[in-house]
Image (spheres, rainbow, N blue to C red):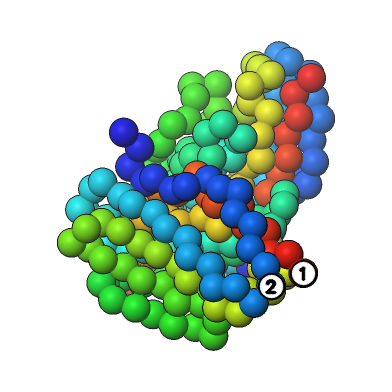
C-alpha cells in the first residue's frame, strides 16, 4: 500500500458527460501528479500541483482541469467526455521538493466512456 | 522520437531464469532513474531508484545505469512466477519534476 488513495475505483459514463476523480496524497506529501494510462499511449503526465498551486502541465486536454485543496487532496475534472478518454487515471505524490524524486502511485481510477 | 524507448515484449522466461529489461533515453537532462512494477490494472509500484551511473542492488533486483550511453537496465535474478507483471522504466530531471515513462515490458515467468 503506497499510502495514496483514489476514488472511485471504476467509473462508467456516457459521451458528453463530466466526471470528477479524487486523490489523497501520502501523509506529509505536498505534491500531486496526475497521469493517464491508455493502451496505445502508455503512462502520460497530465498535470502537477504543489501545495495548492499548479506547478507543471503536460499533455492535458483543455476539457480537463484539476485543483488541489487546502487539505492537499486533489481532484481531476474531465468534461465533454469522448470515447478516447477511456483509460486508467493515476495520481502520484511526493514531497515535491529537491529532497526526493520518487513518486508513489495510487491504485488508479478506471474510466470507461460509452 | 520518444524520450524513453522500451521494448514492450512480451517476454516469457522459465522460473529461476535471469531477466534483463532495458530502456534507452534521449535527453541528457534526465538525472534520476526508476523502475516500477505494475500488476494488471493496479497502480505502479516503485522497485528501484538510482541517480548515478553504476549498479544498485536490492535483493534479487539490480538496476544499472550508463549515463554515457543513456541506457538503463533492470536485472531480476532467480525469477519467480510472482514477478510476472509489466515493468516500467521512468526518468526525471529531478527537483520534483514529472516522470517520463517507457511503454513498459510485459514479463511472464512460467513454472
Q: Quadrant of residue A19?
A: top right
Query: How many numbered marks are there?
Result: 2
Q: Which residue is mark 2?
A: B15
| Crowdedness near tag 2: few (<14), some (14–19) or many (≥20) residues, C-alpha within 10 Å | some
Q: In which quadrant of the rendered view does residue B16 lie?
A: bottom right
Residue A10 lies left or right of residue B42; in this view the side is: right
Gap between marks 2 and 1 measured at Cα = 5 Å
* Residue receiving disc 1: B111
Query: Visible in this render: residue A46?
Result: yes
Q: Residue at x 26, y 46 (%)?
A: B26
- Residue A96 in the image: state x and y as whole percent: 40, 61
Q: Is residue A10 left or right of residue B48?
A: right
**Residue B6 x, y percent position in the rendering:** 44, 48
Q: Is residue A74 above or below residue B80?
A: above
Answer whether residue B97 is visible to the viewer in this image. no
Quadrant of the rendering where the C terminus of chain A is positioned: top right
Where in the figure is residue B48, as x and y percent of width and height?
Answer: 47, 72
Disc 2 secondary structure class:
loop
Earlier along the polypeptide chain: callout 2 or callout 1? 2
> How far across and down, in percent of the image, does residue A85 sit?
64, 25
Quadrant location, the N terminus of chain A: bottom right
The answer to whether the residues at label 2 and label 1 have Cβ atoms under 8 Å apart is yes
Which of the chains bears the disc numbered 2?
B
Residue A57 - label = none
Which chain does the numbered disc 1 sit on? B
User: Measuring 54% from the left and 85% from the top, which residue is drawn there?
Assistant: B59
Left or right: A68 in relation to A56: right
Q: What is the residue that sits farthest to the bottom in this orientation?
A: B59
Amino acid at each position: 500500500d503506497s499510502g495514496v488513495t483514489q476514488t472511485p475505483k471504476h467509473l462508467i459514463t456516457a459521451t458528453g458527460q463530466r466526471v470528477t476523480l479524487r486523490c489523497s496524497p501520502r501523509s506529509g506529501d505536498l505534491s500531486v501528479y496526475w497521469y493517464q494510462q491508455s493502451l496505445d499511449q502508455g503512462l502520460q503526465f497530465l498535470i502537477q500541483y504543489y501545495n495548492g498551486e499548479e506547478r507543471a502541465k503536460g499533455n492535458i486536454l483543455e476539457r480537463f482541469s484539476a485543483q488541489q485543496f487546502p487539505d492537499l487532496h486533489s481532484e481531476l475534472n474531465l468534461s465533454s467526455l469522448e470515447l478516447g478518454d477511456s483509460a486508467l487515471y493515476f495520481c502520484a505524490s511526493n514531497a515535491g521538493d529537491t529532497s526526493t524524486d520518487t513518486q508513489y502511485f495510487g491504485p488508479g481510477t478506471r474510466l470507461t466512456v460509452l | 522520437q520518444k524520450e524513453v524507448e522500451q521494448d514492450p515484449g512480451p517476454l516469457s522466461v522459465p522460473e529461476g531464469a535471469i531477466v534483463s529489461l532495458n530502456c534507452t533515453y534521449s535527453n541528457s537532462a534526465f538525472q534520476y532513474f526508476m523502475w516500477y512494477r505494475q500488476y494488471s490494472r493496479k497502480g505502479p509500484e516503485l522497485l528501484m531508484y538510482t541517480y548515478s551511473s553504476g549498479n544498485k542492488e536490492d535483493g534479487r533486483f539490480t538496476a544499472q545505469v550508463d549515463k554515457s550511453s543513456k541506457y538503463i537496465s533492470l536485472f531480476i535474478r532467480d525469477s519467480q512466477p510472482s514477478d510476472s507483471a509489466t515493468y516500467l522504466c521512468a526518468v526525471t530531471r529531478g527537483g520534483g519534476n514529472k516522470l517520463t515513462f517507457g511503454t513498459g515490458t510485459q514479463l511472464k515467468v512460467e513454472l
